[in-house]
């Protein structure tokens, strides 16, 4: 019986994936969003191949300071003569890495806890859920601010702080999905043939909870990027002279009166990235929802 | 023909199509109905035959894209409904013609009390003040067998059967000339069913309301209706009074319906379902829509679409097999 | 009904304890402590230790937390290291500014989102619908501090219509309220639209139309009253969110509210003020969320019914 299930499962999964992809492709916004996301990831990955960090990104050139956008400097220069276009491009590395790592942290912790809570129930579930309630009772921004200012300013602490604030949502979503799946008959069947609990959780339950987790992860990367740039804006993120987008906005703020271009481009970068991720996440949500066929 | 004043509903050649992205659903194809004052017509047919669409068309409640309604005549109590403007339609809905729907569980608005929902109809159509309307709403509740103290309660506080009574109260509040009941008891338990039907009969007799009762249950038709019209694939294929259709059945489909009923007197007899399925309304066959499933189908049946022909009295049916003068279906052959 | 309220209030207590312990412990992990700030110039290490002992700062975390908790019950959240004023009083003083900003933002958001959401829902699938949704998405994706800066550039520096500083006049409220409101608007428009779409599918609307209720009233009364239920709870949740997250906007517009208080005191290592403010904010949020749940019950008769006591149920059920 178990073998039969194994044989048919991959075939079904393939056609399910094909179905999801088909739905996703029909959503123009989601496709555009995905392309933009891929582009930004590409920029992030290869920025330090195309740009020389020391001269182009952080190298000061006071003779060229505070210039409006021109053919030489597409986004203009900042108060230390650094080319803003290059800095914005390089900044993609921070946003992408913080976004991905933070959400990975949140996902690993959150999904594990949620799965345990949903599967075992009882006191374990109560303890985990109450702890989640406590963690989410503190406003996200405040919690992250506190963590970073206590642990010190560094990119790792930033990732940790943002990651921790992502945990509660993953716990809740995973637990809900596990609860729905747990009562299905094939779990009973798995238990009947003697699979260990751990195997049941990882092999049978989690794959079926994937959809809401994937959607949540995509959307959380978007909000992680906003959180990270917010923290950097407050001076609590990646330390100078790193060109993280929020930090660039914070720097530009001092010159807002006469050099407003400095606040335009980094913010635009954030917005485009987040918008693309949101459209992608929305598209995923729609195409993974079985009720919304055709 | 009946005197004009006596005719409550006249529908001639009603056609309703739903034009979707990839296909067109031909839901109703040339239906004609005539209902006199005080008369109850049973509209019978399987799911998908077009009964509900026909009923919604009378009140012009079909969603206009994608639905397209065409008709030679649509008159209620002599008023031309086909060409009415929206305000005029809103005026007659609920007052001249009322409709009740199949599922009582979802037909009531959860955030208004039952009293408010009845009173709204009265305020709209009878020009009463709020308090007058409320009083009358309470009377209507008593009429359908619900204590008037419950008028301030919300729908979720009532059982299915009681919800349906409330819906009947709403429908009859303004004493309509015609009540269209779309499978009003299908979603209810059998014992409650009997109560509701009894209630409807009582009220109908009291106010001499005409009624179209849509159902797939021939038993209900036998109990409550004066006349029957059998629908198949968007067409009426047989109609007449109870005696004519039940005892002198003409159309093979109607025969099939009667044969599908379990025979309580003869426990050993086998069920005789009609083989096959109703045709796809996006792809209706040429000729008679029932021909593919009909035991008596001739070549003519598959070529030409049958028209309604008289069979004596008020009995009419659309079946080409009767072009052969000696022909009759099995059922009622001995009775002739 | 009251039993439910009391139950919820009691459940809040462990959460408040948990949160305060969490914040207290985290803040405690910061390097350095009060003594470094409070000690006079030229004090030696031994002097610092003596002061530490006097203030009880050398005791284990849990002991200090329990003492702190005891103080909390009396409304005593300690004294600010920097300004030497009472933490509780300082917080309460700054709170009205944040509350004003929050309500103004919600107002902006609701006035724009609800009509737009209804409009999009009644034209489901059309171009207007799609455009509205895209606009909502854009609003959602803009970091609100960036929007604030852009608004300052456009309306304060270039056009001079509104001030960029937070002097709490009505005109200085406009830009920050729009900044926060825009982010809220995106979510609220989407929620309104999807709630309306769900309701517009319901059978009871067909009953209303069959009764002859004019279409406009079907939408604005029969449908909207049902659609509003989840919308109202989202608004309430957003209010809570704004109170907790106004930090950035208050920083951009120099608005003297609670968010700025926390950031400023963090920068100055004023631990009691930070800890006390965050705990106060969290308590405030929990109370608001409780009120939102109660509001939900008040507005939806079906939910209300679940909380009626047995006595009441016997009276109604037949």
Image (tube, rainbow, N blue to C red):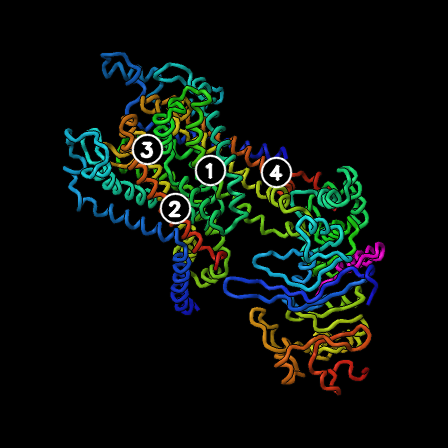
Q: Residue furthest bottom?
A: B326
- According to the picture, the residue beneath numbered tag 4 turns out to be C299
Determine which quarter of the picture holds residue C248. top left
First to last magenta residue range: B191-215
Whole-number angstrom distance, CA of label 3 to CA of label 2: 20 Å
Q: Is B209 contained in the magenta span?
A: yes
Residue A231 badge: 3
Label 4 packing within 10 angstroms: few (<14), some (14-19), many (20+): some
Q: Secondary structure at mark 1?
A: helix
Determine which quarter of the picture holds residue B184. bottom right
- In screen coordinates, is A65 left or right of A95? left
State whether discs 3 and 2 lie on one chain: yes
- According to the picture, the residue beneath numbered tag 1 turns out to be C185
Residue C293 badge: none
Q: Quadrant of the N terminus of chain A?
A: bottom left
Whole-number angstrom distance, CA of label 3 to CA of label 4: 38 Å
- According to the picture, the residue beneath numbered tag 2 turns out to be A278
Nearest the viewer among B88 and C209 is B88
Q: Residue furthest right?
A: B206
Q: Earlier in the sequence, mark 4 or mark 1?
A: 1
Whole-number angstrom distance, CA of label 1 to CA of label 3: 23 Å
Q: Is residue B107 in view?
A: no
Q: Nearer the viewer, mark 4 or mark 1?
A: 1
Label 2 packing within 10 angstroms: few (<14), some (14-19), many (20+): many
Chain designation of label 4: C
Q: Secondary structure at mark 2?
A: helix
Q: Secondary structure at mark 4?
A: helix
State whether discs 1 and 3 lie on one chain: no
Q: Is residue A189 in view?
A: yes
Chain designation of label 3: A
Q: Secondary structure at mark 3?
A: helix
């Amino acid at each position: 019986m178990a073998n039969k299930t194994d044989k048919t499962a991959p075939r079904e999964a393939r056609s399910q994936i094909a179905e999801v992809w088909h739905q996703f492709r029909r959503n123009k916004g989601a496709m555009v969003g995905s392309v933009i996301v891929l582009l930004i990831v590409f920029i992030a990955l290869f920025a330090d191949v195309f740009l020389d960090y020391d001269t182009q990104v952080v190298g000061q050139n006071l003779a060229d300071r505070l210039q409006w956008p021109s053919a030489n400097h597409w986004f203009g220069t900042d108060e230390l003569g650094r080319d803003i276009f290059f800095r914005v491009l390089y900044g993609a590395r921070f946003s992408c890495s913080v976004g991905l790592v933070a959400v990975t942290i949140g996902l690993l912790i959150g999904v594990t806890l949620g799965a345990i809570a949903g599967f075992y129930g009882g006191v374990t579930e109560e303890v985990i859920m109450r702890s989640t309630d406590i963690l989410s009772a503190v406003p996200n921004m405040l919690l992250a601010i506190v963590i970073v200012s206590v642990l010190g300013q560094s990119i790792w602490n930033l990732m940790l702080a943002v990651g921790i604030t992502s945990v509660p949502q993953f716990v809740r979503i995973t637990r809900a999905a596990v609860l729905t799946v747990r009562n299905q008959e094939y779990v009973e069947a798995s238990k009947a043939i003697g699979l260990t609990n751990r195997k049941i959780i990882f092999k049978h339950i989690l794959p079926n909870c994937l959809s809401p987790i994937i959607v949540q992860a995509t959307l959380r990367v978007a909000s992680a990027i906003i959180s990270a740039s917010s923290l950097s804006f407050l001076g609590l993120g990646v330390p100078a002279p790193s060109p993280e987008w929020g930090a660039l906005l914070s720097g530009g703020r001092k010159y807002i009166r006469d050099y407003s271009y400095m606040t335009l481009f980094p913010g635009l970068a954030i917005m485009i990235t987040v918008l693309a991720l949101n459209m992608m996440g929305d598209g995923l949500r729609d195409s993974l929802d079985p009720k919304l066929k055709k | 023909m009946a005197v004009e004043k006596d005719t409550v509903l006249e529908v001639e050649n009603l056609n309703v199509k739903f034009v979707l992205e990839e296909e067109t659903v031909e839901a109703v194809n040339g239906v004609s109905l005539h209902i006199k004052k005080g008369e109850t017509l049973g509209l019978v047919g399987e799911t998908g035959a077009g009964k509900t669409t026909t009923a919604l068309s009378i009140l012009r409640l079909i969603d206009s894209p994608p639905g397209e309604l065409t008709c030679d005549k649509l008159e209620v109590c002599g008023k031309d409904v086909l060409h009415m403007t929206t305000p005029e339609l809103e005026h007659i809905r609920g007052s001249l013609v009322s409709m009740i729907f199949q599922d009582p569980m979802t037909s009531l608005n959860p955030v208004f009390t039952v009293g408010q929902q009845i009173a709204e109809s009265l305020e709209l159509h009878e020009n009463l003040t709020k308090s007058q309307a409320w009083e009358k709403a309470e009377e209507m509740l008593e009429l359908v067998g619900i204590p008037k103290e419950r008028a301030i309660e919300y729908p979720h506080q009532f059982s299915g059967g009681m919800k349906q009574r409330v819906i009947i109260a709403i429908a009859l509040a303004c004493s309509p000339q015609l009540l269209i009941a779309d499978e009003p008891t299908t979603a209810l338990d059998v014992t409650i069913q009997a109560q509701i039907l009894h209630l409807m009969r009582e009220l109908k007799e009291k106010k001499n309301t005409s009624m179209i009762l849509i159902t797939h249950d021939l038993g209900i038709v036998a109990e409550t209706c004066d006349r029957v019209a059998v629908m198949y694939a968007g067409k009426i294929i047989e109609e007449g009074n109870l005696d004519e259709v039940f005892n002198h059945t003409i159309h093979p489909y109607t025969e099939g319906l009667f044969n599908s009923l379990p025979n309580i007197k003869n426990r050993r007899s086998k069920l005789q379902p009609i083989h096959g399925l109703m045709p796809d309304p996006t792809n209706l066959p040429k000729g008679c829509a029932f021909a593919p499933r009909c035991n008596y189908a001739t070549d003519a049946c598959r070529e030409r679409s049958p028209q309604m022909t008289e069979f004596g009295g008020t009995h009419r049916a659309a079946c080409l097999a009767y072009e052969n003068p000696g022909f009759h279906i099995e059922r009622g052959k001995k009775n002739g | 009904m009251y039993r439910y309220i009391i139950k919820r209030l009691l459940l809040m207590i462990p959460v408040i304890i948990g949160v305060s312990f969490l914040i207290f412990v985290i803040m405690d992990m910061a390097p350095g402590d009060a003594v470094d700030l409070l000690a006079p110039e030229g004090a030696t290490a031994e002097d610092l230790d003596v002061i530490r002992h006097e203030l009880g700062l050398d005791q284990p975390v849990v002991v200090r937390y329990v003492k702190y908790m005891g103080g909390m019950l009396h409304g005593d959240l300690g004294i600010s290291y920097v300004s030497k004023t009472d933490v509780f009083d300082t917080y309460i003083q700054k709170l009205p500014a944040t509350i004003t900003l929050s309500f103004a933002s919600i107002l902006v958001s609701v006035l724009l989102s609800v009509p737009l959401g209804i409009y999009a829902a009644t034209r489901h699938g059309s171009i207007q619908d799609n455009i509205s949704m895209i606009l909502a998405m854009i609003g959602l994706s803009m970091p609100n501090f960036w929007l604030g800066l852009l608004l300052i550039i456009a309306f304060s520096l270039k056009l001079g219509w509104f001030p960029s500083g937070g002097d709490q006049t009505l005109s200085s409220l406009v830009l920050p309220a729009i900044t926060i409101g825009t982010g809220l608007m995106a979510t609220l428009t989407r929620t309104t639209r999807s709630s309306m779409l769900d309701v517009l599918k319901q059978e009871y609307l067909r009953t209303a139309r069959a009764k002859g209720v004019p279409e406009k009233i079907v939408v604005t009364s029969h449908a909207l009253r049902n659609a509003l239920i989840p919308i109202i709870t989202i608004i309430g949740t957003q209010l809570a969110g704004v109170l907790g997250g106004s930090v950035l906007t208050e920083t951009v517009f120099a608005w003297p509210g609670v968010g700025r208080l926390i950031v400023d005191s963090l920068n100055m290592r004023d631990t009691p003020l930070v800890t006390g403010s965050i705990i106060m904010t969290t308590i405030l949020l929990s109370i608001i969320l409780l009120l939102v749940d109660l509001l939900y019950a008040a507005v939806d008769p079906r939910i209300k019914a679940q909380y009626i006591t047995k006595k009441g149920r016997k009276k109604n059920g037949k």
